[in-house]
Image: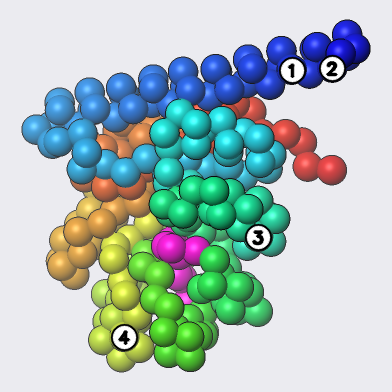
Amino acid sequence: MSPREDDSADDATQQRGGIADNLAAVHGHIAAAAQAVGRAPDSVTLVAVGKLHPRQAIEAALRAGQRVFGENRVQEAQGKFPPLRAEHPDIALHLIGPLQSNKVRDAVALFDVIETVDRPKLARALATEMERTGRRPDCFIQINTGEEPQKAGVMPREADAFIALAREELGLPIAGLMCIPPIEEEPAMHFALLSKIAARNGLSALSMGMSGDYEAAIRFGATHVRVGTAIFGARPVPT
């Protein structure tokens, strides 16, 4: 083996160990945050976000026992997860990025949970595809809690009507709500708002909280936290 190959093997071993250690630390923080508010640690699902990270990083997380993953783009997930699922059929895959209507067929076929249902056109396309295939991944409705014009999501004032459309008229399997608070604002008030909307609509699942604020999200009832950087490190620069 050449010195360069030695270096590559060492780097891979360090990455595997680092990801395993990071996962253990995040699970510890989740447990502590849940117990602090009288919740069971297993009431929170860790969604490990592999955006832009290579398949080898996902494999390291799998070896450490992680089985729930999130991806932002349908195409990227298509390139990474089919071979991984052949080896690990218990993987659960969440779509956590925007979904274009022309990718609905691929998304329904690949993902177990679609967290970013955010407009009537998309909801109708999902309902049509689920009816066609019989495959019904759970759906979360994305709420734009900060009412940011550049960000996807249903406005809070329109949330009740959209939830009713998706769940009652279209028959989508709506499991809960998701939000991404504005970067420059205290996330707690956004988590509280999402929790309030979910409660009045009888929805129990809340996907909220990322690497920098997932512990706060758990205090406000998060059932799913989407953590990437704290597990996998800084994202590679896209080429």
Real-space Cα distance between discs 2 and 4?
54 Å
40 or 82: nearer the eye? 82
Real-space Cα distance between discs 3 and 1?
27 Å
Which numbered circle lies on residue 86? none
Whichever of callouts 3 and 1 sits on the residue coming sooner in the sequence is 1
For badge 1, the amino acid type reads: Ala
Q: What residue is disc 2 on?
A: 5
Residue 121: x and y, percent?
52, 84
Tell me the element at label 1: helix
The answer to whether residue 82 is left or right of residue 136 is: right
Q: Tell me the mark number nearer the camera, choosing from 3 and 1.
A: 1
Q: What residue is disc 1 on?
A: 9
Real-space Cα distance between discs 1 and 2?
6 Å
Picture quarter with the C terminus: top right
Whichever of callouts 3 and 2 sits on the residue coming sooner in the sequence is 2
Real-space Cα distance between discs 3 and 2?
29 Å
For badge 2, the amino acid type reads: Glu
Q: What residue is disc 3 on?
A: 78
For badge 3, the amino acid type reads: Gln
Report the residue at 90% width, 12% height from top. Answer: 2
165 or 236: nearer the eye? 236
For badge 4, the amino acid type reads: Gly
Q: Is residue 81 above or below residue 39?
A: below
Whichever of callouts 3 and 4 sits on the residue coming sooner in the sequence is 3
Residue 66: x and y, percent?
43, 37
Q: Is the Cβ of the residue at disc 1 closer than 8 Å to that at disc 2?
A: yes
Mark 2: give few (<14), some (14-19) or many (20+) Cα within 10 Å: few
